[in-house]
């Protein structure tokens, strides 16, 4: 049986990756497996190629775009691309894996359009932009300029929430985790 897709999107700092990692680690019965996206940005911290992302040069990324190899992709900033390879997703689904997409909001909307009812799309929303600022500053991984860019982008991304199947407001992380778990369990049947 082919696997289903779980799309999880959110503005940076909303807790999306924390919730996805918790679902995958604490609930193996869901048979969730990451769709590893490609990016043209440099690895952060302990990130490894082929684990968190496939790290490509901007030129290599553009070549894959030309060859129509992506299910979705976006140029987030100049020469900073993110995208999902079609072939990898199909390989995973054919193995019966439920494929998880931890993607930006435009990517999430595009994947949902492509797969329709075979995919569940979740939007993880911060309680406020000010709380998002506090989280991004506390993460201490970005410059003040980068944080301001992320916040400006977040305000725009919040306008996409209505295009997702479900919106989960991450005001309290434990509550958001449990809500995500119930929604995903219901979808996977």
Image (spheres, helix red, strand yellow):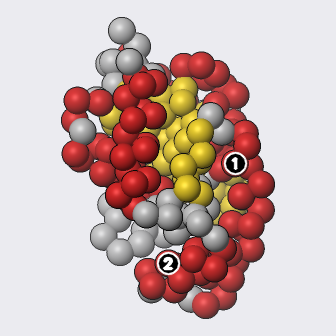
Give the x, y percent position of residue 41: 54, 66
Task: Write down the quadrant of residue 1 in the picture.
Answer: top left
| Upstream in sequence: badge 2 or badge 1 | 2
From this view, report whether residue 113 is shown above or below residue 174: above
From this view, report whether residue 175 is shown above or below residue 101: below
Are there few (<14), some (14-19), or many (20+) residues within 10 Å of tag 2? some
Query: In this rendering, does residue 83 appear at all?
Result: no
Residue at disc 1, secondary structure: helix
Instruction: Quickly name the residue at label 1.
Output: 161
Residue at disc 2, secondary structure: helix
Give the x, y percent position of residue 189: 38, 18
From this view, report whether residue 166 is shown above or below residue 21: above
Residue 54 is left or right of residue 62, and the answer is: left
Q: Residue at x 54, y 26 (%)?
A: 119
The residue lying furthest to the bottom in this view is 144
Q: Residue at x 55, y 42 (%)?
A: 122
Query: In this rendering, does residue 118 appear at all?
Result: yes
Q: Residue at x 49, y 48 (%)?
A: 102
Closer to the camera, 138 or 62? 138
Give the x, y percent position of residue 77: 71, 67
Give the x, y percent position of residue 93: 41, 21
Instruction: Quickly name the residue at label 2.
Output: 135
């Amino acid at each position: 049986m082919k696997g289903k897709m779980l799309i999880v999107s959110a503005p940076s700092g909303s807790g999306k990756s924390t919730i996805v990692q918790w679902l995958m680690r604490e609930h193996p019965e869901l048979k969730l497996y990451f769709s590893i996206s490609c990016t043209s940005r440099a690895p952060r911290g302990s990130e490894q190629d082929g684990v968190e992302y496939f790290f490509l040069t901007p030129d290599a990324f553009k070549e894959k775009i030309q060859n129509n190899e992506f299910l979705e992709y976006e140029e987030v900033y100049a020469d900073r691309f993110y995208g999902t390879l079609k072939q990898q997703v199909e390989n995973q689904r054919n193995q019966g894996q439920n494929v998880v997409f931890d993607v930006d909001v435009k990517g999430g909307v595009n994947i949902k359009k492509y797969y329709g009812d075979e995919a569940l799309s979740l939007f993880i929303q911060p309680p406020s932009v000010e709380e998002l600022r506090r989280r991004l500053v506390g993460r201490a991984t970005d410059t003040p300029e980068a944080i301001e860019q992320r916040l400006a982008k977040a305000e725009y991304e919040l306008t996409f929430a209505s295009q997702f199947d479900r919106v989960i407001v991450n005001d309290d992380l434990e509550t958001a985790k449990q809500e995500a778990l119930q929604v995903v369990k219901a979808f996977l049947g």
